[in-house]
Image: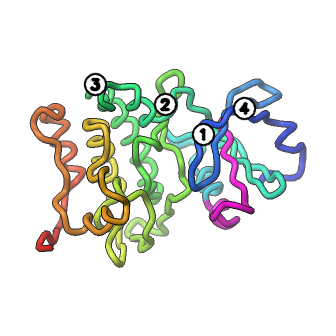
Amino acid sequence: MSPPGPSVHQLYKRLETVGRGAYGSVHKGIEIATRNVVALKIINLDTEDDDVGDIQREVALLTQLRDAPNVTKYYGCYLDGPRVWIVMEYAQGGSVRTLMKACPDGIVEERYTVVVVREVLAALAYLHRSGIIHRDIKAANILITAVGKVMICDFGVSALLTTATSKRNTFIGTPYWMAPEVAQAVPNYDTKADIWSLGILVYEMAKGSPPHSNLDAARVLQLLPRTRAPRLIEGEGSKDMRDFVALCLKESSVDVST
């Protein structure tokens, strides 16, 4: 947290709400001294499930990633009574999910998909070299700035691996984009889980929604470990893109007997 000084209300002005979720809310804001536009993620500790330790871990991770490419820039963290304000770079263009809603049938043209994927890969390469798994790669967590810069956001569920050979054994993420090994009864996974989610992201942009989007999340969790990996078929993007998705969604083994 920032040391004692001016209150967050003296430094930043909160404008309209741009998003809400389990984490709290995100608002467009203005840095009063410079008039720069920022994003304000506000978490109410009295009403949200997040505890102080979770927020401290997220802030520590964001601080570590200040120089990471294609990751939302972190500017500071402030206490405001029972609320925590996390100040970050603002993405005027919204998320890739926002972009999809503006496209016919929710489908992003491949020429734009490849740009998003290239930039996400640059971010993931940096994260994975640093021993970090994002654990929630999806269209809603990929932001676009006013000048077209692509950024990964929402590090609230990210995990820091202690060594290059470590594996996580905690269950967390969004089921529709989740790798099968994360959904196992005893999860055991590493940075490859993000590559699976990247494949689902491409599938999502090519088809308008992730696989099994017609099912509830609990049912998807049951299906993941024992169903074949989804694939794009002929007519759903170029052969290169279909092959890319297949490589991201590569199974080591799968039990489809049930």
The answer to whether the residue labelled 3 contacts the one labelled 1, judged by CB atoms less than 8 Å apart, is: no
Residue most extreme to the right:
5
Which residue is nearer to you in this view: 81 or 88? 81
Q: Which residue is mark 4?
A: 15
Q: Earlier in the sequence, mark 1 or mark 2?
A: 1
Q: Which residue is mark 2?
A: 144
Q: Nearer the viewer, mark 4 or mark 3?
A: 4
Q: Earlier in the sequence, mark 4 or mark 1?
A: 4
> Label 1 sits on what residue type?
Lys
Measure how far apart labels 4 and 1 are at the Cα level.
19 Å
Q: Start and end of the magenta stretch?
A: 39-57
> Label 2 sits on what residue type?
Ile
Q: Earlier in the sequence, mark 3 or mark 2?
A: 3
Q: Is residue 49 left or right of residue 111?
A: right
Q: Nearer the viewer, mark 1 or mark 2?
A: 2
Residue 4, given in percent of the width and then of the height, sits at 88, 52
Measure how far apart labels 3 and 2 are at the Cα level.
16 Å
